[in-house]
Image (tube, rainbow, N blue to C red):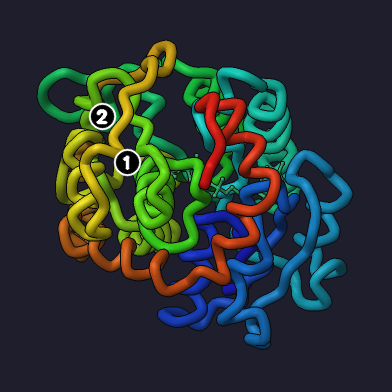
Amino acid sequence: MRLLVCGGAGFIGSNFVRLRLRESEDEVVVLDKLTYAGRRENFHDFAEDPRFHFVHGAIEDPEAVAAVLDGGAAGGAPVQAIVNFAAETHVDRSISEPDAFVRTHAQGTYVLLEAARERDLRYVQVSTDEVYGSIEDGSFTEDSPLRPSSPYSATKTGADLLVQSYFHTYGLPATICRGSNNYGPYQYPEKLIPLMILNALHGDALPVYGDGMQVRNWIHATDFGRAIGHVLEHGAPGEVYNAGGPDECPNMEVVKRIIELTSADESLIEYVTDRPGHDRRYSLSSAKVRALGWEPRVRFAEGLEQTVAWYRENTWWWEPIRSGDYRAYYERQYGRSLA
Ligand SMILES: NC(=O)c1ccc[n+]([C@@H]2O[C@H](COP(=O)([O-])OP(=O)(O)OC[C@H]3O[C@@H](n4cnc5c(N)ncnc54)[C@H](O)[C@@H]3O)[C@@H](O)[C@H]2O)c1
């Protein structure tokens, strides 16, 4: 199958493309705007693969989308399915600068859906557990009410509803796959796990929001990538599938495990003012996608150890980030500089 992967230069998208090239016969075209989070470095090990093509462009640009779908921009045959990862993904940035979130999630998803409708293409929207909001006990199912709390999750929810409307109104064969918190290699260091790993390796303070007892349901990016592939191949049109990780862990516990794995000092922990509207706990039931034959393979303890090892060994990947614009972002966010 010839697949269009939007947002494939980011963290989960590039892990997904790597998996598809390795584990399927797919030809993959990536369309990506290359925001601060999208990087050509994420293709370093498959950039020369003849089944891989990259096109620089935005999903909200109908001409760029038409050119990749019809084969013109990537010099090949027309695309048969779209998987949309393209998004602004950092909740903190959605609080300080929400406009890009509205543009990409609302306008961008609309442009892709229209293009898919005109060509009757299969469509998978990559979404998040954050659309359900916070849950104290138990786990969200696909029928749980949608109660997003941040501009990030609200605009992701809007995109999901638009996708469902294209199934109900036009019969577009669209599915949605909602993942829990992802971790693994190639994740931009503003997110909790790589932030803590890199700060611990440098002896920088480890900024923990509030009391650090926010619970997340961690899933390795390769497990989420396989769940998305599974939904693409076996999901029923119009359906939503949750893909949660096998383990839950409070943020403070994650930080302490990273301290152990990096032999850093616990005194680096620094409590900072909690994020406004910070959700307390996320938890997903994955029974529906498990019934399709998917299950997570990576337990959190093992995946976290591998992730710490990956960041330790791949300084070439993060050094340019840590010495570039990210420093100014970090100073604005935490009111202190990096070592
Ligand atoms: N990271 C998580 O924990 C998590 C969990 C569940 C779901 N998700 C979802 O998975 C998807 C990917 O997340 P990620 O963590 O890999 O994000 P990321 O920020 O690492 O990557 C996002 C990618 O989208 C690209 N992009 C942004 N706006 C674009 C636009 N308008 N047009 C084209 N490309 C654009 C960026 O350049 C980048 O390559 C998102 O839809 C996100 O909501 C993420």
Q: Is 124 drawn above or below residue 21 in the view shown?
A: above
Task: Identify the image quadrant of residue 298.
Answer: bottom left
Nearer-N-terminus badge (1/2): 1
Amino acid, disc 2? Tyr
Please say if 205 is above or below 300.
above
Q: Which residue is mark 1?
A: 180
Q: Assess mark 2: CB under 8 A from ligand 1? A: no
Of residues 330 and 231, which is closer to you in this image?
Answer: 330
Q: Residue furthest top?
A: 277
> What element does badge 1 sit on?
loop
Mark 1 residue CB less than 8 A from any atom of ligand 1: yes
Residue name at image x 30 percent, y 39 percent: 268
Residue at image point 16% right, 57% down: 301
Q: Is residue 115 left or right of residue 124?
A: right
Q: From this view, report whether residue 284 is shown above or below residue 188.
A: above
- Real-space Cα separation, disc 1 to disc 2, in angstroms: 8 Å
> Would you place residue 81 above or below residue 77 in this image?
above
Residue at the spot x=56%, y=81% of the render? 45
Contact? badges 1 and 2 (CB < 8 Å): yes
Q: Secondary structure at mark 2?
A: loop
